[in-house]
Image (cartoon, rainbow, N blue to C red):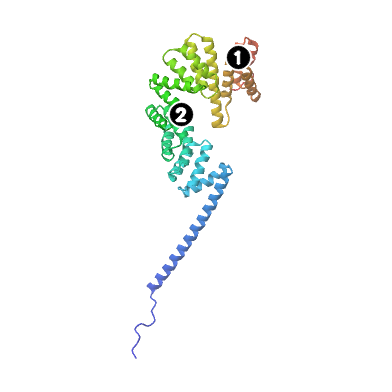
Amino acid sequence: MAANPSGPAIKTPARSRRRWLVFLACLVVVGLAGFLGRQWLQDQAERRQALRITERGDFSRSEPLLLRIAQRHPKDSAVAKELALGYFRSNRLAEAEAYFERWCEANPSDPEPFLQRIAMWVKWNRLRNAVEDARRVLQLQPDNRKLHQQLTYWLLTDGQFVEAEKECQQFLRRWRDDPWVLLIQALVYQRTDRRREAAAIVDQLIRDIPDFPEAYLLRGTLYRDVNQPAEAVPWLRRSAASQGPHRRQALFELAKALDQIGQNQEADQVMKEARLLQEQDFLREMTREFGSVNISAQARLAEEMLNAGQSENGLRLLARLLEHDPNCAVAHRVLADYYDKQGQPERAAEHRHPQGSTP
């Protein structure tokens, strides 16, 4: 009987090594998969924890967790969003910018990240960036009337008068009677020396809208532009009689017009009131940005109150500063100047050289 050529296989050393290598490779793959799985689960747990803490409004606690996740997963849109908004609300705008960039890149068809970034640009006074993002959003939301209004204003404020005029015209083709964009168009004409066109628009606004102090302000300013201060005064008085963000500029313009027609005493008093509003606006901005206002700024506000005839309020503010710091030099200096003007040299002397005063 012939021998079977296909008898039992003989194990060679090379074949055994291959089997061991395959076995070891499988172990490495399984181990790596386990490690990555554990890392993924850990990342997800840490991510959920960070987002929960952020939802509770505790960004200071969630920040280090969010940063670790963002470093490992730079395309995580939700984490980029929370970091961007957290830094923005903390007034850490330079840090917010990088994460707004990630958030916007991850969501190019979503207007929300771009609208939020616009708020940062405006707060940072980077209007050109705000304009760029506004145009991006308007491509996504062409019916966003409020944003289109703001775009015309930002272009005007940034001195891009040609672009501002184009946007006004485009806006008014859709919403032809919008008074604010008409006013912005008139301001564009004024600042590009087309005062007749500006006057035509503002006069129509005044006829159509009985109470429009911003239009009264521009009407008075246009009269001053052509050296007709007497005609400007009634319009500027009407504008300054209404409260609102426009009032400070109306007072400044009114003071200049009064001075031009020789009413110097009233002009001086109106200018003091305008400067007082300027200081108040400055303090409000400081408080909004930093949460507190330094003593020198508060003393300067008190001084403007005294100059504007609001003696009771000014003295009350200075008394509060001295109660906080009896040796505050700037408060003593303001009081000394005030009592000198009031003809009370003895009281002025008390504040001129107070014991142990501090700057």
Residue 126 makes an appearance in the image: no
| Three-letter residue code for mark 2 | Asp
What is the secondary structure assignment of the residue under circle 1?
Answer: helix
Residue 359 in the image: above or below residue 73 = above
Q: Does 3 sit left or right of 238 as displayed? A: left
Residue 38 pos. (x, y %): 52, 57
| Three-letter residue code for mark 1 | Tyr
Residue 251 pos. (x, y %): 51, 18
Image quarter where the C terminus lies is top right
Residue 308 in the image: above or below residue 38 = above
Residue 282 pos. (x, y %): 53, 25
Residue 224 in the image: above or below residue 144 = above
Residue 248 makes an appearance in the image: yes
Which residue bears the numbered disc 2?
Answer: 178
Which residue bears the numbered disc 1?
Answer: 338
Quick one: label 2, few (<14), some, or many (20+) residues within 10 Å?
few
